[in-house]
Image (tube, rainbow, N blue to C red):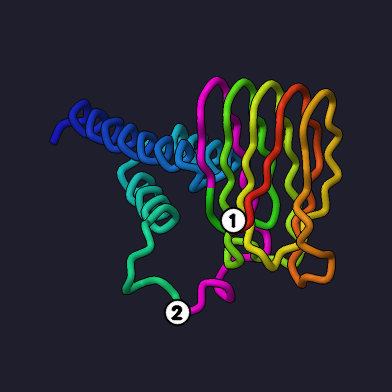
Amino acid sequence: MNATSLTETIENRKNKIVDELSTEYSLNRITIEEYERLIKYSQDIETEKELVIFEKIVKEHIAPVTQDSAPKNNKKELPSKIRQDCFTLLSSRKTTGPMSSGTFTTILGEHKLILTEDDLINDKTVLNVSVLLGEMIIQIPPNVSVINKTIPLLANVISPDTGRNNPKKIVIKGSVLLGEIKFKIK
C-alpha cells in the first residue's frame, strides 16, 4: 500500500470515528467535554498505530451495553457523578438516563425529562433549568422529594407535594420566563 493510499485510509477511519462520536453526543450519551476531548485527540492522529489505539478507546467508551454485558446491579456500577446537559430550541426533546446533575435549556420548545429512581444515582440531584417561552415536563418517581428553587417570571411552576422526608431529592434551580415547568409523578 502506498503512502497516499494509507493516508486516505487513516483519514477515512478517522472520519468514521468522528461520525460515531457526533452521533453519541447528539444522543446525549457523552458529554460535550468528552466529545471535544476525543475530537481534538483524533485530529492529532498521524500513524496507523495511533489510530488503532484511538479506535479501541472510542469503541470501549461508546460500546452499547448488551443484556449479557450489563451489570446485574447498575446502581452500584455507576460513577457518583454523571452530568447531563441538554439544549432545546424550537423543537421537542426527550431525555432520560442516569444523572447526578444537569443543565437543561429550553427556548420556544418542549423538553421532557423522564427520571426513574434508578436514574437518580445520588441522594441529591441538582438540575439547573432555563425555560424561555417554552415548557419543561419533569417526570419523577413518587418517592422523590422536589425542592423548587426556580425563579418564575410571568411563568407557571408548581412543585408537586411529595414530602420532604424521602431519601432522594431533586433540587430544581434556574429561571422560567414566559414558560412553564410541569411535574408528573409516575
Relative image position of residue 11 (x, y in whole percent): 30, 31
Q: What number of labels is visible? A: 2
The extreme left residue here reads 1
Q: Quadrant of the C terminus?
A: bottom right
> Which residue occupies 33% across, 32% down?
15
Q: Is residue 175 left or right of residue 180?
A: right
- Asked whether 62 or 56 is in front, the reply is 62
Image x and y of residue 118, in percent: 58, 67
Residue 56 among magenta residues:
no
Q: Residues within 10 Å of mark 1 (few under 14, many from 20)?
A: some
Apparent side of residue 94 relative to residue 123 in the rendered image (left or right): left
Secondary structure beneath dot 1 equals loop
Residue identifier under label 1 = 115
Residue 143 versus residue 38: which sits nearer the camera?
A: 143
- Which of the 4 image quarters holds residue 63? bottom left
At 62% across and 41% down in the image, what residue appears? 137
Amino acid type for the residue under numbered disc 1 = Leu
Magenta stretch: give its range.
73-95
Residue pointed to by mark 2 = 72
Dots 1, 2 in contact, CB < 8 A: no
Cα–Cα span, label 1 and label 2: 20 Å
Residue appearing at x 60%, y 31% in the figure: 87
Amino acid under label 2? Lys
Q: Is residue 104 above or below residue 66?
A: above
Please determine whether, in this image, residue 152 is positioned above or below residue 97.
above
